[in-house]
Image (cartoon, rainbow, N blue to C red):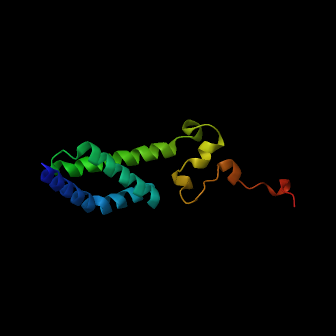
Amino acid sequence: MNTDKSAQSEVLDRFLAGIERRALIMTELATHDREEALDLVQDAMLAFVNRYAGKSEQEWPPLFYRVLQNKIRDWHRRAARPASAVGSGCAAILTRRTPATRSRSWPIPPIFGRRMPLATRTA
């Protein structure tokens, strides 16, 4: 019984190691952010193992890619949501990571990111 579980675990580990690179490339192309892509692939792998580890090995590839695609879709939905839907106040804007703010380590809310017109600036 214990050897069956360890053998199943080894097969599952090899499967995940074999698809990791392709999954990361797919997710990075979808998000344009390496850190977000790594997080999404990790979340997809954990969800896959928790839900489908008991399925047959032949069923794993389509199931994993479905889980990954759903994680990517969820990420895009969260990124497209207006700040008011995420939470209230400036804190929601400051902590939200979206494709528009992915290159900044600390996203600047749009209201603070605008430059003042020259006529209103003072020395």
Q: Residue at x 22, y 47 (%)?
A: 53
Extreme residue toward the front, this view = 2
Rendered location of residue 59, percent (x, y):
18, 48
Q: Is residue 33 visible?
A: no
22 lies left or right of 121:
left
74 lies left or right of 23:
right
Disc count in the image? 0
Q: Residue at x 61, y 48 (%)?
A: 94
Q: Is residue 82 visible?
A: yes
Residue 25 versus residue 92: which sits nearer the camera?
A: 92
Q: Residue at x 15, y 51 (%)?
A: 2
Q: Quadrant of residue 70?
A: top left
Image height of 75 relative to 119, above or below: above
Q: Residue at x 44, y 61 (%)?
A: 34
Question: Which of the image's four quarters has the C terminus?
Answer: bottom right
Rendered location of residue 104, percent (x, y):
58, 59
Extreme residue toward the right, this view = 123
Rendered location of residue 8, percent (x, y):
17, 53
Residue 89 versus residue 81: which sits nearer the camera?
A: 89
Rendered location of residue 61, percent (x, y):
22, 52
